[in-house]
Amino acid sequence: MAELKELLGIAREYTTGLRLELLRKSLGADAERARAPELAAYFTHCNLQPAHLMLALRSAMTLTFKAKLKRTAASFARRLLELNPKPEFAQTVRRRISIYLSIHLSMSIPYIYIHRYIYIYIDRDR
């Protein structure tokens, strides 16, 4: 019975993650600039297997960088390094972190990452 509950929990996490990813991919080009990085960020908080979490973090890192969210991209890169990727990929990620933090251009999305909790702020001016 405990194994069944564990499998249901895993299935729930993957279902939530896949819903977020499908929603992100269904966005149009205009909405993609702001909403897609936010959805990718939420996807990284699903309790996935390490290999799948690496893919989610890599995707979120790339999307946030393209959206000029450099500090957020650097935070995903740091989380990616915590998962101990292959040495050659880890070196690439470290290089990206230094690039992300050296660029001073930055925007914001309604996503703040603090100690595995998600805080959402609402910008009334948008």
Image: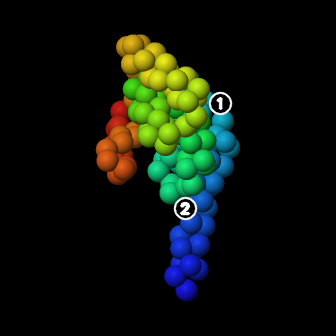
Picture coordinates of residue 26 (x, y %)? Answer: 68, 43
Picture coordinates of residue 89 (x, y %)? Answer: 58, 29
Picture coordinates of residue 73 (x, y %)? Answer: 46, 29
Residue 48: quadrant of the picture: bottom right
Q: Mark 1 = which residue?
A: 29
Q: Residues within 10 Å of mark 2 (few under 14, many from 20)?
A: some
Q: Is residue 88 above or below residue 10?
A: above
Q: Residue at x 55, y 86 (%)?
A: 1
Residue type (three-letter) at the residue carrying disc 2: Glu
Q: Is residue 108 above or below residue 106?
A: below
Q: Residues within 10 Å of mark 1 (few under 14, many from 20)?
A: few
Label 2: which secondary element? helix
Residue 38 falls left or right of residue 15 = left
Q: How is the image coloured?
A: rainbow
Q: Residue at x 50, y 46 (%)?
A: 44
Q: Residue at x 59, y 72 (%)?
A: 7
Picture coordinates of residue 83 (x, y %)? Answer: 49, 43
Q: Residue at x 55, y 50 (%)?
A: 50
Q: Is residue 50 above or below residue 73?
A: below
CA distance for labels 1 and 2: 27 Å
Nearer the observer, 38 or 59? 59
Mark 1 or mark 2: which comes first in sequence? 2
Residue 108 visible to an observer of this rendering: yes
Residue type (three-letter) at the residue carrying disc 1: Ala
Residue 61 falls left or right of residue 26 = left
Position of the C terminus by quadrant: top left
Q: Mark 2 = which residue?
A: 13
Residue 8: quadrant of the picture: bottom right
